[in-house]
Image (cartoon, rainbow, N blue to C red):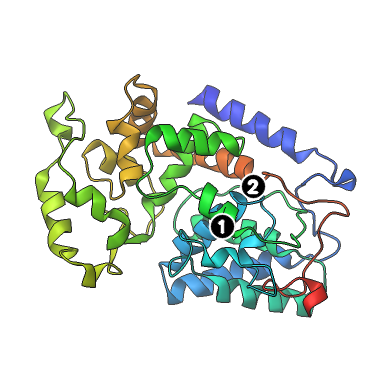
Amino acid sequence: MEVKMKVWIAVMAFWGIIDGSDGNLMKGYYKETCPLAEEIVRHNVQVAILRDPRMAASLLRLHFHDCFVLGCDGSVLLDTKGEMVSEKEATPNANSLRGFEVIDYIKYLLEEACPLTVSCSDILAMAARDSVFLRNGPWWEVLLGRRDSLKASLEGANRYIPAPNSSLEGLIANFKEQGLDVDDLIALSGAHTMGKARCVSFKQRITQPNTEQTFYDDRFKRHDTFRRVLRAQCRDSTRDNLLTPLDIVTPSNFDNHYFVNLLRGRGLLISDNVLVSEDHEGYVFKRVWDYAVDRDLFFADFAESMLKMGSINVLTGVDGEIRKSCRFVNAWI
């Protein structure tokens, strides 16, 4: 663990000395231009979560869905306008992605304090970090300086957002396209320690024949009781939109129980359970086990992977723009 922390400190030190003047992300980017930016975001995320604890998972998910399409550029926040169709209408997002009004309000306050200064994509990155921390998860210094996209990609959202019934091979390939490796996949999957999913998202898991791996240790055999409870809850199509916690043990906390659930066969989505049921070489299973028994290790790796994900294809320098409204490019206002 000591070696792990030394590596983590070295990574943070490296990122901390990057010069933001050449268009790279950096720590303290708004220190001079909008010194209260992070405080405004954190306070309003806290208020939103107090009103609706599920909002923490929703804001974290917004950042993920943004970064996996075109990069971390705020494109997921754009509404449909003219020939541009919003990513909100994509299959993985429609009637599912939420938290837009929270981001809108934070943007409104930041525009009052520091007009055309703080990007929508940076707000998403800060809100995701704060959502995790405010639910007892790790803290990390968000690197800032992103600019906002002038376009959205409905096709990209349908193609790159992982489906809830994805195979392990498919997930690995999907993350690889974003420059993320297997370790990032496992760590970032831990975000499912918070939030809820609709019955329609895991119906296939509870209706298909049981082909999941039975583990050599009797303590972690999958219990049919879990599937029976889910089948009773989602018994017909009228309940497709009924919500179930992704982590039935501590649904509102950011912790490592997600990985404990996987070892017990109690991951909610197919794309969760494949981390152990389809890992024939054992590497992914070992990492799941490591995280299940060592929360601090998971927290450190999750923060590191969030930093890595948050730098996917960012727009900096003179690329893109700082939107006045997160829902529209400035030319439309």
Q: Where is residue 10 in the image (x, y as percent from the top left)?
A: 67, 29
Residue 175 against residue 130 in the figure, above or below: above
Q: How crowded is mark 2: few (under 14 residues within 10 Å), some or many (20 or more)?
A: many
- State left or right for residue 93 relative to residue 27: left
Residue 17 is labelled as none
Specify the amino acid type for callout 2. Gly
Q: Nearer the viewer, residue 218 or 199?
A: 199
Is residue 323 toward the left or the right of residue 103 in the image?
right
Return the residue at label 2: 310
- Residue 221 is situated, as x and y percent measured from the top left of the image, at 15, 34
Residue visible at 15% across and 42% down?
Answer: 209
- Can you identify the residue that label 1 sits on? 128
Q: In this view, does 102 lie above or below 196?
A: below
Categorize mark 1 by other alpha carbons within 10 Å: few (<14), some (14-19), many (20+).
many
Along the line of sight, which residue is nearer the eye, 250 or 199? 199
Residue at left offset 39%, top offset 48%: 255
The reply to whether callout 2 and callout 1 are in contact (CB within 8 Å) is yes
Element type at mark 1:
helix
In the displayed structure, 284 sits above or below 177; it is above
Q: In the rendered image, is residue 248 in sight?
A: no
Residue with the most extreme front position: 83
Query: Does residue 56 appear left or right of residue 178 in this picture?
Result: left
Q: Can residue 72 be seen from the camera position used here?
A: yes
Q: Position of residue 72 (x, y in %)?
A: 66, 52
Kindly identify the residue that appears in the image at 15 percent across and 58 percent down.
231
